[in-house]
Image (cartoon, helix red, strand yellow):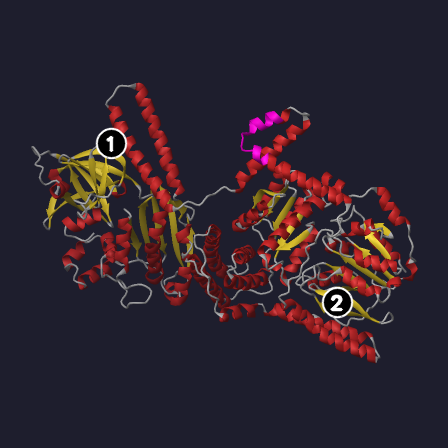
């Protein structure tokens, strides 16, 4: 198996060289080139055709966001943004995602883990996963290894058991690729959307406030970062704050959001399973849970529980998922009532009345 | 815990950070005159950003903290939310100074000490408007909620209370050191497909290692083996194998080399040049055509090699020029002058040693131009000039030497004032002073203990500087010239050779010995009818194009044991630039131009005045290289 070919883009030669040392240590990855500004990056992408790109945002000549836009238009390649995880820089990261970058990691490795080796391994793993699992580029090997036989998909969708008219709450969980997917879906909803929505997006704490604010300006419905004690109003979406856990408490008549500090052992903060679990104790039968693009399987256990108690479950389809991991986990476990494309999820939500 | 200053990664960081800091120095000064230039703001932002990134990698926390603040401030500036003012500029320059100090600490292998909290607070205060906005956000949410429900039930009231409590949460959350983990772990349950792909992967890895083992054996062999099976796959294999090799090469295009090693190489090339000179002299005596061809080939290759090696040691003069915008700005602010510094030819390359050696003299001269050259704005206005003065610093390569010019559009120098001053200081009598030409008068400022300014400022004018400047330029085999016009300005020109390692010289004979004149000093050569010399004030002189130059018989100083047979009527005279002066030397024979490598004098001759070193000439003889400034000091009893 040939290693995944990585292109590094950063105006700091120092940073490129360090990154290259880290990446080349992973036998699955190989750095095939470096570019020191956006313009060079575009040329290198065309010349080298890398499998995955690590991209800086701040660069001379052409910044990372513009470069992402051009690359995605001319030669779509999975791009991982290395950005600064601070509130001020959240905006640029979202812009990069909207421009077509798939995912982001912090430039300062200490932001993901205090253990340097651990952080470096995570970076390598992420690059590898993006190259292999990303559907933004037609990687024949990746597609064939992750896609399911169509027959099995049908079986799971066929047994549509729950009644969708009975809904009072929508809960959406997503990870990699989620920011763009959420935006595309939520923007379709009218201001008078009749249900409250809980959003669980895997995202660092520094990013969620800006993300909520950004969605709020783009969409007709109200979107806010959930705070402890929030009551649920129709036409409002509550984004789980990063680094925390969002739980639904109170009674099924008067549900209240409870925000708990994330524990050190938890893999995901916020965690979709935890939120879904809390919903299952209140109003599972009246809940529509949707799992969108993302790596891993967060949400599967939660959906299992919800569905056994009568909830409806939708999963994003492979075609429109940036990373077909979490939706695949739902589909494979036979939990999905519907498997829909990103746009269709919006259409179907609008029809819920 | 000290840093390992030998660490490759640290060195790599220092090289990059050093370049960025130099850039920041210039960019910040430039920013003062163009505070709205968004390219500039972006560039400065990126500078802080990049240093922060690197410092973060090495856990240089205090550097990260400072750069982080700097980056934030410039992020606001570049978004146009705030504009730079003079006070801000002062803070930025202080930040840069601190950063430079941290850089030096890191260089010497210590963790940089934390920045003065005052500065950090200052920077933080520039972020204020942004913070105000951030504080405002939670408010509307609260009011919105209360407005929604007109009657507040107990439940809702409680919820509201909770909510207000909760308000604190976002604040806590941002400061909490808890690191969010978003990274997705692969499925905990391994499905069949995944297991299979894992197997594939493992096998693939083995294949990869196997391939790697065969890689070192040259590519053609691999291709041969691969061609045997199906035709399609090998082609793919070959291209894949070939490409990474090509690209990894591209990835690392530079290596770091110790300058000492470069010096060694340069020395060896110098030796090679001497051998080439020797061989071509030998060849000239033989008739062998093949030999002649080979020798001329050798000459070309040696010249190329010499050039190439010289280029590796070259650095743009920007390295020195880069610090001047800051120097001029600070000084001008201090003196309440308004001065615009223009840099020309920053990309001009010269030998690394020269770049370093030129730094101090140039700083001195530039400070002088600011202090003495350019007038106060009011005075300028009165004399019909713009209030803003101008200093131009330029570098150009002229053949094998570099010409540096520092010109100001100030008041210029008054030769008469200088004459008077010289008499006052007892350096010469009035008559001698009146005989000085204008340029000789200007050159007086290089005399030890001669200061132009009536009062001594803390900036310059202590009268120790200029003679030191002249000495250090002379040491580099360089020369200084001054031209000045009252009311228009002054220009100082410095000529230095491109490199110190190999020196083009003019070979001459004194008696039966060969001597080498550094070519950079040689101004012109001509034949002289000895009858046309005059003796003035006990000094033999000649007139060259209306200029009177002192004339010396070099033989009398350096080869006095040789007694010439018969007195020729025509002598060879070499006009030499010594510092700011021109002097004529009578020599017995002119041999020609030759590139030589300077060798230190042996123990016996060590310390002999007037000799810079020795070299081996093409015909295998030893030639002494002259050091004119010292020669004049020793033999002519005059300061040059």
Under circle 2, the secondary element is: loop
Q: Residue at x 68, y 47 (%)?
A: A130
Observer-nearest of A9 and A118: A118
Q: Which residue is mark 1?
A: B618
Element under label 1? Answer: loop
Residue linked to disc 2: A226
Q: Is residue A50 above or below residue A309?
A: above
Coordinates of residue B65 in the picture (x, y in percent): 53, 64
Left or right for B431, reference B138 = left
Specify whether B176 is left or right of B272: right
Q: Position of residue A53 (x, y in %)?
A: 63, 46
Judge left or right: residue B53 versus residue B319: right
Protein chain holding label 2: A
**Residue at the image point whose x is 18% and y is 64% from the top:** B424
Q: Residue at x 37, y 37 (%)?
A: B307
Closer to the eye: label 2 or 1: 2
Q: Which residues are drawn in magenta?
A: B211-225
Q: In the rendered structure, does residue B212 fall within the stretch colored magenta?
A: yes
Marks 2 and 1, Cα distance to the nearest angstrom?
87 Å
């Amino acid at each position: 198996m040939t290693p995944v070919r990585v292109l590094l883009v950063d105006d700091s030669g120092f940073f490129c060289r360090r990154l290259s040392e880290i990446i080349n240590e992973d036998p699955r990855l190989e750095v095939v080139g470096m570019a020191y500004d956006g313009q060079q990056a575009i040329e290198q992408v065309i010349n080298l055709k890398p499998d995955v790109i690590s991209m800086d945002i701040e660069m001379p000549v052409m910044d990372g966001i513009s470069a992402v836009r051009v690359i995605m238009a001319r030669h779509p390649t999975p791009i991982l943004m290395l950005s600064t995880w601070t509130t001020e820089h959240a905006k640029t990261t979202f812009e990069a995602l909207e421009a077509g970058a798939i995912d982001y990691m912090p430039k300062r490795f200490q932001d993901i883990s205090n253990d340097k080796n651990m952080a470096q391994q995570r970076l390598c793993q992420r690059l590898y996963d993006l190259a292999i699992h990303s559907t933004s580029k037609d990687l024949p090997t990746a597609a064939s290894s992750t896609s399911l036989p169509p027959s099995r998909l049908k079986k799971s969708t066929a047994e549509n058991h729950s009644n969708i008219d009975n809904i009072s709450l929508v809960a959406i969980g997503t990870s990699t690729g989620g920011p763009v997917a959420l935006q595309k879906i939520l923007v379709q909803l009218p201001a008078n959307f009749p249900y409250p929505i809980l959003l669980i997006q895997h995202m660092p704490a520094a990013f969620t406030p800006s993300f909520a604010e950004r969605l709020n300006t783009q969409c007709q419905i109200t979107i806010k970062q959930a705070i402890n004690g929030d009551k649920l109003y129709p036409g409002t979406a509550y984004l789980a704050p990063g680094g925390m856990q969002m739980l639904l408490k109170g009674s099924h008549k008067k549900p209240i959001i409870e925000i708990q500090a994330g524990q050190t052992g938890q893999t995901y903060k916020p965690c979709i399973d935890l939120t879904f679990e809390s919903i299952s104790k209140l109003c599972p039968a009246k809940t529509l849970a949707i799992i969108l693009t993302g790596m891993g399987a967060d949400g599967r256990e939660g959906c299992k529980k919800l569905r056994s108690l009568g909830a409806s479950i939708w999963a994003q389809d492979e075609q429109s998922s940036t990373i077909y991991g979490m939706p695949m986990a739902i589909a494979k476990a036979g939990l999905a009532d519907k498997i829909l494309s990103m746009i269709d999820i919006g259409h179907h939500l609008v029809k819920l009345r | 815990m000290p840093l390992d200053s030998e660490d490759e990664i640290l060195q790599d960081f220092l090289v990059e950070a050093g370049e960025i800091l130099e850039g920041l120095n210039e960019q910040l000064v430039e920013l003062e005159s163009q505070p709205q230039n968004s390219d500039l703001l972006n560039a400065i932002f990126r500078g802080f950003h990049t240093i922060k990134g690197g410092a973060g990698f090495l856990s240089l926390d205090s550097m990260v903290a400072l750069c982080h603040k700097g980056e934030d401030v410039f992020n606001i500036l570049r978004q146009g939310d705030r504009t730079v003012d003079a006070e801000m500029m002062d803070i930025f320059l202080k930040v840069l100074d601190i950063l430079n100090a941290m850089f030096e600490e890191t260089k010497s292998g210590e963790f940089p000490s934390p920045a003065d909290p005052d500065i950090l607070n200052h920077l933080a205060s520039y972020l204020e408007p942004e913070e105000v906005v951030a504080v405002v956000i939670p408010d509307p949410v609260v009011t919105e909620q209360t407005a929604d429900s007109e009657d507040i039930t107990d439940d809702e009231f409680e919820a509201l209370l909770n909510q207000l409590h909760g308000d604190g949460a976002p604040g806590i959350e941002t400061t909490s050191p808890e690191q969010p983990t978003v990274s997705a772990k692969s499925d905990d349950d391994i499905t069949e497909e995944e297991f299979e792909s894992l197997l594939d992967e493992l096998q693939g890895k083995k294949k990869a290692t196997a391939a790697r083992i065969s890689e070192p054996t040259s590519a053609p062999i691999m291709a041969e083996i691969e061609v045997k099976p199906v035709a399609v796959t090998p082609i793919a294999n070959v291209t894949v194998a070939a490409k990474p090799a090509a690209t990894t090469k591209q990835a690392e295009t530079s290596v770091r080399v110790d300058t000492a090693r470069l010096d060694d190489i340069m020395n060896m090339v110098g030796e090679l040049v001497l051998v080439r000179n020797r061989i071509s002299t030998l060849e000239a005596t033989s008739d062998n055509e093949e030999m002649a061809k080979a020798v001329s080939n050798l000459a070309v290759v040696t010249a190329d090699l010499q050039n190439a090696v010289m280029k590796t040691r070259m650095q743009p003069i920007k390295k020195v020029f880069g610090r001047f915008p800051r120097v001029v700005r600070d000084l001008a602010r201090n003196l309440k002058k308004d001065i615009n510094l223009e840099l020309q030819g920053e990309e001009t390359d010269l030998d690394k040693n020269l770049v370093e050696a030129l730094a101090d003299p140039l700083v001195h001269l530039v400070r002088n131009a600011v202090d003495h050259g350019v007038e106060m704005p009011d005075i300028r206005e009165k004399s019909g000039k713009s209030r803003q003065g101008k200093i131009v610093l330029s570098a150009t390569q002229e053949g094998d030497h570099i010409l540096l010019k520092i010109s100001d559009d100030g008041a210029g120098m008054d030769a008469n004032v200088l004459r008077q001053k010289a008499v006052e200081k007892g350096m010469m009598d009035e008559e001698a002073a009146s005989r000085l030409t204008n340029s000789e008068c200007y050159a007086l400022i290089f005399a030890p203990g001669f200061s132009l300014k009536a009062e001594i400022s803390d900036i310059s004018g202590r009268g120790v500087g200029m003679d030191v400047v002249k000495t250090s330029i002379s040491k580099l085999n360089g020369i200084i010239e001054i031209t000045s016009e009252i009311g228009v300005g002054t220009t100082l020109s410095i000529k230095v050779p491109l490199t110190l390692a190999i020196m083009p010289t003019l070979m001459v004979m004194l008696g039966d010995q060969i001597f080498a004149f550094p070519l950079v000093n040689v101004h012109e050569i001509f034949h002289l009818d000895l009858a046309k010399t005059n003796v003035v004030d006990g000094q033999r002189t000649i007139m060259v194009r209306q200029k009177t130059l002192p004339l010396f018989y070099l033989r009398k100083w350096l080869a006095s044991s040789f007694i010439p047979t018969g007195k020729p009527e025509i002598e060879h005279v070499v006009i030499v630039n010594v510092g700011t002066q021109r002097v004529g030397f009578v020599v017995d024979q002119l041999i020609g131009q030759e590139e030589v490598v300077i060798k230190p004098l042996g123990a016996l001759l060590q310390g002999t005045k007037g000799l810079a070193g020795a070299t081996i000439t093409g015909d295998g003889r030893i030639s002494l290289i002259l050091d004119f400034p010292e020669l004049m000091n020793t033999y002519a009893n005059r300061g040059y």
